[in-house]
Image: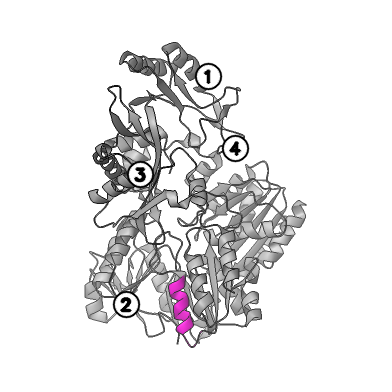
């Protein structure tokens, strides 16, 4: 078991003929992910790396291949449309890697997705990895841009708004011989599809996940909401880290959503909420794995 | 991206919001002409406002010693005298820092006879992913303070993005603000215009503080946006060319402008340990760990996921242009990036910039052994860090 994706998940890539999408589709194929289709309007009928069929629309790709999940690599002006194309085609899961989508587009996407059964992860996220049993964790499912080889199959769930901090946590675990069930990057934008809390609930229900690392950062209150739920319901140990203690108020720290504004979204408030909820707080990003392992 | 008050008022006026009539002036000739025009029209009182991207202008002080960045003037002579004390001066407010900002533009406008000051803003509600209208009877004050001390005085209303703000909602807010019935229609039109400005311009914030009930010369009352602040979503600027041209580079830190030319995300801070990191979250966490071990970060710098040797060199130049910097911490998690490529970039950059400051490099990930070998054989005096904690402690110790 794992959450969201496993080695059987059939994945299509929107934007597979672009250099960014193509490069990562290729790395995902090497990892063992089932990349069954690509979608680029106007390039239907081509083949990616001589094997993966390319379609003009997501609908065609789904009908021909049975793909249930999409990874989106299209440029920001076209990303909202790409997400909703996946939703309209009835995909179970849409993972949007694209960074730089206007907030208004995401407000409209979220509104349009109300009542839909499709789950959106991201945007502006590194994607999802469920490690496999092979060498360098190959044979699992890698969707997005995370380096596959740092993973190891195991029982820790990782959820984070930041890509490189996820890799940091994963590598700390793997170097200590501890593997991961699934690692989910939910993205650094202020409006996103899946929250920390959504992922924490899935980890809580997943029998193969025995412990959780939750990485947050300044801005918004998603970490506080997750902490409040964890306090009441989570049956697994959770270690947490919040980035941005030293970030000046009113400045966006790289991620569009990483901003302290109007005195809200501070690292101090989030760390306090973690403590209050019994989450084991890592004082520095160097000790995320150690703090969790000690708690277990 | 932030824009000036006068630009914000232009956008608001385009969407039907009542703003006091005024002109943005870059020269004293323009100031004189604009003031004369207003007095000739029969105004007895005008206002001259310094245009900088910072709050607290009224209570600010010019480096010349001249008090106040916003002035009321009763005569043309008065306007010329005060205008010339402000234009070209450097205004220091509680938000500018001690270096202040140069006032290159003055807004010369009619001074309204203000009867009542209210607060109005439209922003994103992150919890619901919907636009949020915030209004309060406590105008002209620091709204964060109002929210903290008297939260019951803040009216909040979420807007359904599919319908936009509906007239009945606008009327409800106007009524909740205690406006008399004869002003409800006018105020709701203004509210609709403010919301349209937010939505059509891809704003991340539209703030009218104060929104005023004013008395007209004929004794009737009206509502007007007396001050205005607008921030635009950077990600949406590509579809607003006219707003792009409102960018004022003079309001941005020169090093941040230079960084943006190289697609680097750099924010200058006050400390003395520069950091160069890939990824926004890791870059923030690197600043935090420097502070944790007793140091002080000089900047936030995210070189992104696919940095080239050229970008790393540009990044080094930028962080070394900050005279406060006494040491550098490079923290790279080479997931997709190859550590040897980064190492080569660091070596090239350090040599090109004749680096003489302490340099600690922490590399992890792809081709890390090769990367470390390149650093060791470079002839550079650098220290290698094994983990983030190790690297942070080493640079803090080296800077002393």
User: Does label 4 or label 1 sit earlier along the sequence?
Assistant: 1
Which disc is residue B97 wearing? 4
* Mark 3 crowd level (few <14, some 14–19, many ≥20, 10 Å Cα): many
* Above or below: residue B310 compared with residue B91: below
Look at the image and say whether residue B136 sits in the magenta stretch: no
Look at the image and say whether residue A199 sits in the magenta stretch: yes
Residue B67 in the figure: left or right of residue B220? right
Number of labelled discs? 4
Distance (Cα) linking label 1 and label 2: 64 Å
Query: Which percent across, then down, holds residue B92?
Result: 57, 31
User: Does label 3 or label 4 sit earlier along the sequence?
Assistant: 4
Q: Which residue is tagged 2? A: A92
Query: Which percent across, then down, holds residue A68?
Result: 31, 79
On whether disc 4 and disc 2 are found on a single subunit, the reply is no
Q: Which residues are magenta?
A: A197-209
Q: Nearer the viewer, residue A182 or B168?
A: B168
């Amino acid at each position: 078991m794992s959450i969201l994706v496993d080695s059987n998940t059939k994945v299509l890539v929107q934007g597979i003929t672009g250099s960014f999408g193509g490069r990562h589709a290729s790395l995902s194929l090497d990892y063992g992910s089932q990349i069954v289709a690509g979608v680029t309007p106007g390039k239907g009928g081509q083949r990616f790396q001589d094997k993966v069929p390319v379609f003009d629309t997501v609908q065609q790709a789904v009908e021909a291949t049975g793909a249930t999940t999409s990874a989106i690599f299209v440029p920001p002006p076209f990303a909202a449309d790409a997400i909703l194309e996946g939703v309209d085609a009835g995909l179970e899961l849409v993972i949007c890697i694209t960074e730089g989508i206007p907030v208004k587009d995401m407000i409209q996407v979220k509104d349009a997705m109300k009542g839909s059964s499709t789950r959106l992860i991201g945007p502006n996220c590194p994607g999802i990895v469920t490690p496999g049993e092979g060498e360098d964790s190959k044979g699992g499912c890698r969707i997005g841009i995370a380096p596959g080889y740092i993973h190891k199959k195991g029982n820790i769930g990782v959820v984070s708004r930041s890509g490189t901090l996820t890799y940091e946590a994963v590598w700390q675990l793997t170097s200590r011989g501890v593997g991961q069930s699934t690692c989910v990057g939910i993205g650094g934008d202020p409006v996103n599809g899946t929250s920390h809390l959504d992922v924490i609930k899935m980890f809580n229900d997943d029998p193969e996940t025995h412990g959780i690392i939750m990485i947050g950062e300044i801005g918004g209150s998603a970490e506080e909401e997750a902490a409040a739920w964890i306090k009441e319901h989570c049956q697994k140990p959770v270690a947490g880290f919040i980035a941005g203690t030293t970030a000046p108020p009113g400045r966006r720290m790289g991620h569009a959503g990483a901003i302290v504004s109007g005195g809200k979204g501070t690292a101090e408030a989030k760390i306090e909420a973690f403590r209050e909820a019994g989450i084991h707080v890592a004082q520095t990003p160097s000790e995320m794995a150690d703090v969790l392992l000690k708690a277990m | 991206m932030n824009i000036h008050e006068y630009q914000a008022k232009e956008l608001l006026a385009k969407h039907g919001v009542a703003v006091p009539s005024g002109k943005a002036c870059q020269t004293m000739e323009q100031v004189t002409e604009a003031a004369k025009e207003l007095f000739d029209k029969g105004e007895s009182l005008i206002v001259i406002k310094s245009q900088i991207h910072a709050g607290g202008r009224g209570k600010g002080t010019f480096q010349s010693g001249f008090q106040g960045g916003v002035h009321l003037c009763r005569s043309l002579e008065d306007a010329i005298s005060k205008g010339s004390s402000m234009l070209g001066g450097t205004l220091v407010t509680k938000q500018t820092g001690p270096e202040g900002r140069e006032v290159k533009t003055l807004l010369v406008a009619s001074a309204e006879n203000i009867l009542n000051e209210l607060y109005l803003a439209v922003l994103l509600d992150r919890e619901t992913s919907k636009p949020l209208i915030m209004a309060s009877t406590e105008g002209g004050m620091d709204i964060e303070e109002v929210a903290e001390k008297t939260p019951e005085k803040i009216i909040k209303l979420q807007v359904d993005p599919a319908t936009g703000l509906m007239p009945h909602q606008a009327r409800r807010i106007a009524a909740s603000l205690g406006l008399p019935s004869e002003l409800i229609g006018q105020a709701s039109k203004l509210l609709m215009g403010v919301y349209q400005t937010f939505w059509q311009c891809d704003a991340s914030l539209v703030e009218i503080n104060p929104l005023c009930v004013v008395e007209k010369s004929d004794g009737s009352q009206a509502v007007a946006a007396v001050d205005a602040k607008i921030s635009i979503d950077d990600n949406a600027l590509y579809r607003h060319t006219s707003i792009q041209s409102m960018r004022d580079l003079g309001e941005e830190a020169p090093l941040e402008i230079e960084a943006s030319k190289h697609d680097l995300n750099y924010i200058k801070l006050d400390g003395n340990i520069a950091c160069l990191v890939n990824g926004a979250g890791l870059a923030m966490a690197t600043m935090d760990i420097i502070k944790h071990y007793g140091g002080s970060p000089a900047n936030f710098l995210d070189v992104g996921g696919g940095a080239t040797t050229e970008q790393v060199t540009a990044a080094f130049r930028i962080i070394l242009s900050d005279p406060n910097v006494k040491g550098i911490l490079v923290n790279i998690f080479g997931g997709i990036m190859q550590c040897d490529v980064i190492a080569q970039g660091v070596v090239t950059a350090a040599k090109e910039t004749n680096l003489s400051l302490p340099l600690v490099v922490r590399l992890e990930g792809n081709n890390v052994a090769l990367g470390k070998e390149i650093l060791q054989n470079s002839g550079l005096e650098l220290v290698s860090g094994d983990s983030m904690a190790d690297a942070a402690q080493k640079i803090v110790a080296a800077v002393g």
